[in-house]
Amino acid sequence: MSAVIDASIMVSYLMNDEDSSLSVPVITPLLGSPTHVPSLWVYEMASAFRIAEKRERITSDDTRQYLSYLKILMIDHHHPDSQEIVDIARQTGLSIYDASYISLCLQEDLPLATLDKQMRKVAEELGIKVLV
């Protein structure tokens, strides 16, 4: 099965001090097939790791390891239409970043894997299947 995965669920899956009870059952089956992300995803992941370093939750070696792991996954990076992203953000109140995930789901007709409650609510309202 393919899906669009957001940073919140992947960070939960990777970081040892996160509660992964929701992310592991969703992400594990997806790892064998291509998953999809908007192009900003890699920067969101790097930012989450850097924040965790500053809070001394992980080390720089952990960040290096996590980023290396992300490179070997079958992740297709997409550039959803920017006007559609802006329109979705206007209509839903989501940030541009979160709207990019919704746009990608709509564009590729894929379900969404997220732990973000507001994004989940919007996705469901738009008829997008949510995997959490």
Image: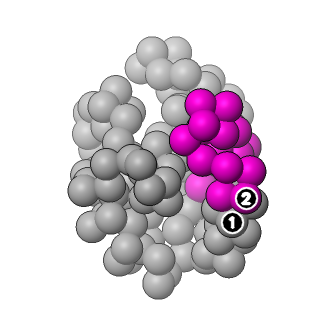
Q: Is residue 22 above or below residue 50?
A: below
Question: How far across and how far down the image is residue 15, in percent?
Answer: 49, 54
Front-most of 120 and 61? 61
Q: Please, what secondary structure does the residue beneath circle 1 have?
A: helix
* Rendered-image quadrant of the N terminus: bottom left
Q: Is residue 94 above or below residue 81?
A: above
Three-letter amino acid code at disc 2? Asp
Q: Is residue 8 left or right of residue 74?
A: left
Q: Is residue 102 left or right of residue 131?
A: right
Residue, disc 1: 65
Q: Is residue 98 left or right of residue 22?
A: right
48 part of magenta stretch: yes
Question: How far across and how far down the image is residue 119, in percent?
Answer: 38, 33
Q: Please, what secondary structure does the residue beneath circle 2 have?
A: helix
82 part of magenta stretch: no
Q: Is residue 80 above or below residue 120?
A: below
**Residues at marks 2 and 1 touching, judged by CB atoms closer than 8 Å:** yes
Front-most of 87 and 28? 28
Front-most of 3 and 85? 3
Residue at 66% over, 39% down: 53
Residue at 67% over, 49% down: 59
In the rendered structure, find residue 61 and report the number of the disc placed on it: 2
Residue at the outermost bottom position: 32
Which stretch is magenta? 37-62
Question: How far across and how far down the image is residue 104, in percent?
Answer: 55, 49
Residue at 54% over, 76% down: 34
Dominant secondary structure of the residues highlighted in magenta in the image: helix
Q: Residues within 10 Å of mark 1 (few under 14, many from 20)?
A: few
